[in-house]
Structures are given as structure tokens and as C-alpha cells.
Image (cartoon, rainbow, N blue to C red):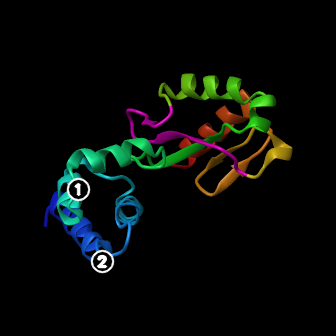
């Protein structure tokens, strides 16, 4: 089976399992993203048809919620905290540095597919602001230098 065929069968299975739940759209979108890492554009017509919605309605929900991706994520996702504590402790400068270092903006993936950059609105690490998360690891008091070191360590271990 092709990769596209496998993807379609996964989406169809998720739709079949969840379509009869009240408010099924969000659970289906979460299910697809959890299974595939993103919600492929090719899945929108199937989801819309199963729920008797327009494609525009499904796409509108995907584009409204920052959590949903419509492109494959990088091998590692970097979450930068944008909550008030982190902003007060240099989070905006860290954002600019991260975007510059990676050559991408929020909700984008580096050309080599290694990293995606996502905003998050609290990692629960306010005492150690600014904070970021890469994979399951949370980093505190992140500076431009410690950001670069974390990225370099990940690249070296890959």
C-alpha cells in the first residue's frame, strides 16, 4: 500500500470510529493529527463528507486552532513559551533569535525537516522564564546561547 493509501486508511478508520460522537469534528481532527502528526489537506473532503459539513467549515476549524498543522511537522518540535512571565524575562528576544537561527516563523518547519517552531502559552515553568520545550524536555532561563546549544546537541545526536 502506498504512503497516501496508508494515510487515507488511517483517516477513514478515525472517521468511522468518531463520526457518530456529538461534536465529532474536533475529536476527528485531534485523532488524525495524533496519528499522522498533521491534518493533511487530502483528508478534509472525507472528513467534511462524513460529518455533512462543507470543506470550508472543516478547513476553517483547522486554520482557526493553532494546535492543528496542515503540513508534516519536523523531526523535533520546539515550543517557545509566549506567556506573560516569559515575555517579561526576554521571551520576545528569544523568539526573534530562534526564528533567525532556524530561518522559520511559528507554525513552520525548517527546509531540512529537522525542526518545527510552535508557540505555547505556558509550560508551567514560570519561575525559570523564558522557557521552551523540545520533545519531552523543558528548558528554563533560555538564552540565545543555551538555545543554540540545545539545537546543536540535538543535531549532533541525530
Magenta-drawn segment: 106-123
Which numbered disc, 2 or 1, marks the residue that appears first in the sequence?
2
**Residue visible at 41% across and 61% down in the picture:** 30
Mark 1 nearby-residue class (10 Å; few <14, some 14–19, many ≥20): some
- In the picture of the structure, the residue carrying the numbered disc 1 is 53
Depth check, front residue: 31 or 19: 19
Identify the residue at horizontal 24%, vertical 64% (top origin).
51
| Image location (x, y in percent) of residue 44 | 23, 53
Residue 118 position within the rendered picture, expressed as x and y whole percent measured from the top left? 53, 40
- Which residue appears at 70% of the width and 23% of the height? 93
Of residues 30 and 105, the one drawn nearer to the viewer in this rendering: 30
Q: Quadrant of the N terminus?
A: bottom left
Q: Which of marks 2 and 1 is in front?
A: 1
Residue projecting furthest to the right: 127
Q: Quadrant of residue 148?
A: top right
Q: Distance between the residues labelled 2 and 1?
A: 17 Å
For image coordinates 60% across by 38% down, the residue present is: 151
SS class, disc 2:
helix
Residue designated by label 2: 17
Q: In this view, does 93 lie to the left or right of 13?
A: right
Q: Quadrant of residue 96?
A: top right
> Can residue 71 be seen here?
no
Toward the viewer: 102 or 89? 89
2 and 1 marks in contact (CB < 8 Å) = no
Task: Please state the horizontal and vertical placement of residue 63, each as a whole percent of the image.
Answer: 38, 42
85 shown above or below 158 = above
Amino acid at each position: 500500500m502506498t504512503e497516501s493509501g496508508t494515510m487515507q486508511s488511517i483517516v477513514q478508520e478515525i472517521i468511522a470510529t468518531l463520526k457518530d460522537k456529538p461534536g465529532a469534528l474536533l475529536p476527528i481532527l485531534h485523532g488524525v493529527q495524533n496519528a499522522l502528526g498533521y491534518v493533511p489537506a487530502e483528508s478534509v473532503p472525507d472528513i467534511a463528507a462524513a460529518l455533512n459539513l462543507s470543506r470550508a467549515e472543516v478547513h476553517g476549524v483547522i486554520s482557526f486552532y493553532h494546535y492543528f498543522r496542515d503540513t508534516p511537522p519536523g523531526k523535533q518540535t520546539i515550543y517557545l513559551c509566549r506567556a506573560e512571565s516569559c515575555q517579561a524575562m526576554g521571551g520576545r528576544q528569544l523568539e526573534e533569535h530562534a526564528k533567525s537561527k532556524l530561518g522559520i516563523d511559528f507554525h513552520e518547519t525548517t527546509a531540512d525537516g529537522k525542526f518545527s517552531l510552535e508557540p505555547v502559552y505556558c509550560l508551567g515553568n514560570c519561575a525559570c522564564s523564558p522557557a521552551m520545550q523540545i520533545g519531552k524536555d523543558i528548558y528554563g532561563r533560555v538564552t540565545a546561547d543555551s538555545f543554540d546549544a540545545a539545537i546543536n546537541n540535538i543535531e549532533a545526536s541525530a
